Image: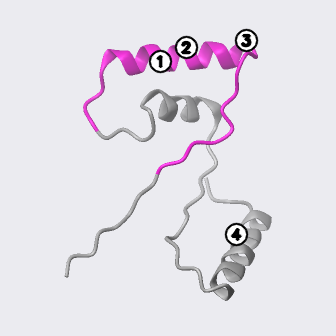
Protein backbone atom coordinates (compact mmCIF):
# COMPACT_ATOMS: atom_id res chain seq x y z
CA UNK A 1 0.00 0.00 0.00
CA UNK A 2 1.38 3.39 -0.93
CA UNK A 3 1.91 6.03 1.72
CA UNK A 4 -0.83 8.63 2.18
CA UNK A 5 0.00 11.97 0.59
CA UNK A 6 0.61 13.74 3.92
CA UNK A 7 3.16 11.10 5.02
CA UNK A 8 4.90 11.25 1.64
CA UNK A 9 5.23 15.03 2.01
CA UNK A 10 6.71 14.63 5.50
CA UNK A 11 9.18 12.04 4.18
CA UNK A 12 10.35 14.45 1.44
CA UNK A 13 10.69 17.28 3.97
CA UNK A 14 12.86 15.17 6.30
CA UNK A 15 15.00 13.99 3.37
CA UNK A 16 15.52 17.64 2.38
CA UNK A 17 16.72 18.56 5.87
CA UNK A 18 19.09 15.58 5.91
CA UNK A 19 20.61 16.59 2.58
CA UNK A 20 21.01 20.20 3.81
CA UNK A 21 23.12 18.84 6.67
CA UNK A 22 25.25 16.94 4.16
CA UNK A 23 24.02 13.51 5.20
CA UNK A 24 24.33 10.64 2.75
CA UNK A 25 21.73 7.93 3.23
CA UNK A 26 20.02 5.06 1.48
CA UNK A 27 16.48 5.47 0.17
CA UNK A 28 13.88 4.49 2.75
CA UNK A 29 10.86 2.60 1.48
CA UNK A 30 7.84 2.73 3.78
CA UNK A 31 4.99 0.25 3.47
CA UNK A 32 1.77 0.14 5.45
CA UNK A 33 0.64 -3.42 6.17
CA UNK A 34 -2.42 -4.90 7.87
CA UNK A 35 -1.80 -6.69 11.16
CA UNK A 36 -1.87 -10.20 9.64
CA UNK A 37 0.84 -9.30 7.11
CA UNK A 38 2.99 -7.75 9.87
CA UNK A 39 2.56 -10.93 11.94
CA UNK A 40 3.73 -12.96 8.94
CA UNK A 41 6.84 -10.80 8.52
CA UNK A 42 7.56 -10.90 12.26
CA UNK A 43 7.18 -14.70 12.35
CA UNK A 44 9.95 -14.95 9.75
CA UNK A 45 12.16 -12.72 11.91
CA UNK A 46 12.00 -10.07 9.21
CA UNK A 47 11.49 -10.73 5.54
CA UNK A 48 12.04 -14.38 4.57
CA UNK A 49 15.50 -15.20 3.29
CA UNK A 50 15.43 -18.99 3.52
CA UNK A 51 13.13 -21.99 3.10
CA UNK A 52 10.05 -21.86 5.38
CA UNK A 53 10.04 -24.11 8.43
CA UNK A 54 7.12 -25.27 10.58
CA UNK A 55 8.45 -23.06 13.37
CA UNK A 56 7.48 -19.92 11.40
CA UNK A 57 3.87 -21.09 11.27
CA UNK A 58 3.90 -21.68 15.00
CA UNK A 59 5.31 -18.18 15.63
CA UNK A 60 2.71 -16.64 13.29
CA UNK A 61 -0.11 -18.42 15.12
CA UNK A 62 1.18 -17.18 18.49
CA UNK A 63 1.48 -13.59 17.23
CA UNK A 64 -2.00 -13.68 15.68
CA UNK A 65 -3.65 -15.03 18.85
CA UNK A 66 -1.81 -12.52 21.01
CA UNK A 67 -3.05 -9.67 18.78
CA UNK A 68 -6.57 -11.11 18.70
CA UNK A 69 -6.76 -11.24 22.50
CA UNK A 70 -5.43 -7.68 22.75
CA UNK A 71 -2.24 -8.76 24.52
CA UNK A 72 0.25 -7.40 22.02
CA UNK A 73 0.55 -5.26 18.92
CA UNK A 74 3.44 -4.82 16.50
CA UNK A 75 3.74 -1.19 15.47
CA UNK A 76 6.68 -1.46 13.11
CA UNK A 77 9.24 -3.80 11.66
CA UNK A 78 12.41 -2.91 9.81
CA UNK A 79 14.23 -4.60 6.97
CA UNK A 80 17.52 -3.22 5.72
CA UNK A 81 18.23 -3.69 2.02
CA UNK A 82 21.49 -2.38 0.66
CA UNK A 83 22.57 -2.59 -2.93
CA UNK A 84 26.19 -3.50 -3.35
CA UNK A 85 28.21 -1.67 -5.95
CA UNK A 86 30.96 -3.68 -7.60
CA UNK A 87 33.86 -1.68 -8.93
Q: Toward the viewer: 87 or 71?
A: 87
Residue corresponding to mark 2: 62
Q: Is residue 79 placed above or below 57 in the rendered structure?
A: below
User: Mark 1 touching mark 4, by CB under 8 A?
Assistant: no
Assess disc 3: are there few (<14), some (14-19) or many (≥20) residues with their C-alpha within 10 Å of its C-alpha.
few
Q: Earlier in the sequence, mark 3 or mark 1?
A: 1
Residue wearing tag 3: 69
User: Are dots 2 and 1 in contact, CB under 8 Å?
Assistant: yes
> Residue 11's quadrant in the figure?
bottom right
Q: Pointer 3 and pointer 1: residues touching (CB < 8 Å)?
A: no
Residue 59 is labelled as 1
Q: Say which label, 2 or 3, has the lower sequence index.
A: 2
Dividing the image into 4 quarters, which one contains the C terminus? bottom left
Vertical relation: 78 (above or below) 34: below
| Residue that carries the numbered disc 4 in the rendered image | 11
Looking at the rendered structure, the secondary structure element under dot 2 is helix
Mark 3, secondary structure of its residue: loop
Marks 3 and 1, Cα distance to the nearest angstrom? 16 Å
The image quarter containing residue 75 is: top right
Give residue 78's position: percent from left, percent from top: 54, 47
In the image, residue 10 lies at what x, y percent? Answer: 76, 70
Determine whether, in the image, residue 77 is placed left or right of residue 5: left
Residue under the image location 60 percent in, 86 percent down: 22
Q: CA distance from mark 4 to mark 3?
A: 34 Å
Q: Which residues are magenta?
A: 50-79
Direction from residue 73 to residue 82 in the image, left or right? left
Q: Which mark is residue 43?
A: none
Amino acid sequence: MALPRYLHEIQRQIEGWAREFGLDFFDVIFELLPYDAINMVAAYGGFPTRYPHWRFGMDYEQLSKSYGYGLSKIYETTAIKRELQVR
